[in-house]
Image: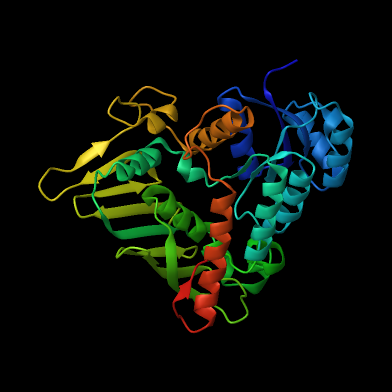
Amino acid sequence: MSKKIRLGILGGGGDSLIGILHRVASFINDNYQIVGAVFNPDFETSVNFAKKIDIPTSRIYKDFDTLIEEELKLPKEERIQVCSVLTPNFLHFPMAKKLLENGFNVICEKPMTTTYEEAKILQATLEKAGTVFAVTHTYTGYPMVRQMREMIKAGAIGNIQKVDAQYYQGWINPIIHEKDKRSSTWRLDPEKSGISCCMGDIGVHAFNMIEYTTGMQIKSLLADLNYLYDDNKMDIDGTALVRFNTNAKGVIRTSQIATGEENGLVIKVYGNKGGLKWEQENPNYLYVLSEDKPLQVYKPGHAYNSDLSLDGTKLPPGHPEGIFDAMANIYLGVSRAIRGEKYNDGEFPTMLDGVRSLNFIESSVASHNQGNIWVDLD
């Protein structure tokens, strides 16, 4: 019997970017084997895709409910141990909830649910289930993001005074200006995506990066969102001022209509002794800023990095590590948790991160709708 963790996949078939990302990430550290799936709502399409990527079709199921039913009939040592939920947002909650209720571990794409209330219900479900739950905020898996977290925790930049997180994309710009075109994507459909597009899709990454790297929680925010057209129900651009439980303040700037931008996630943290800056499009460089020293640049794989950073580094110095490696680091951490091994609490985002993310999304929309006022996060 294989010692690899038996992985199930929900969604992510065809040319899905997120599907490729998760499958490759699960293979990188040799900890997982895909044994069952529902890649597509159409059973034949799902089976054909399984054949294409050379996965046995005997446990490719016609739908999610059948997957649960049939897997539970198998001996425990054969059934799926953890299931990755890669479906559109509106399916995350019902699928994750049923998986937890039936004793499965879960790896879930973000946002974890479409409402804060659902997130709290899911949290209560996990507490009863006692299984492992991870939310794939992928960027937390980059070695230099982990190095940033550890340096801040160690006091390298002193007391934090200012945080600036930006996430700019331009992919919606070509479709937003024509009603028929913007109706073609589920991300602009509140029935499938939830109440927010920009804040819910990418703003939440910036929010998570702030809390992950600084170790501080955002206590309140004031948001101003942009829908561009009166008949467009979903935000596609926005800014939020944020306050912490200290004197530190910050800003989250997000856009999906920043023409020409690709995947411009940037996090900057400034303390009274120095600053740190990381850019997703140049992920192997962590910039260390100081008032009395030259600019320093940290890179992956060197002995000067933290244990958490080095554990997530797979290649020698000078060999670029990218988003597949970052997602693989999350899968690695989850594998340790499932096996009951010791792991760093920074190895993968948890249910708590998912709950706080939904709190952030709903608070941002509420702040905007109530006239751009300060709103407290729970």
Between 12 and 353, the one lying in front of the other is: 353
The answer to whether residue 331 is left or right of residue 278 is right
The answer to whether residue 332 is left or right of residue 278 is right
Point out the image quarter for the N terminus.
Answer: top right
Q: Please, which residue is most extreme toward the bottom here?
A: 371
The answer to whether residue 125 is left or right of residue 202 is right
Q: Residue 184's spot in the image, x, y percent?
A: 68, 63
Q: Please, which residue is most extreme toward the front here?
A: 128
Residue shown at 80%/39% (left/top)?
Answer: 46
Between 36 and 356, the one lying in front of the other is: 356
- Place residue 334 in its image quadrant: top right
State whether residue 239 appears in this view: no
Q: Please, which residue is most extreme toward the left here?
A: 292
Look at the picture and state if 77 lies above or below 367: above
Look at the picture and state if 234 lies above or below 309: below
Look at the picture and state if 328 lies above or below 159: above
Q: Residue 14's spot in the image, x, y percent?
A: 71, 42
Residue shown at 64%/34% (left/top)?
Answer: 23
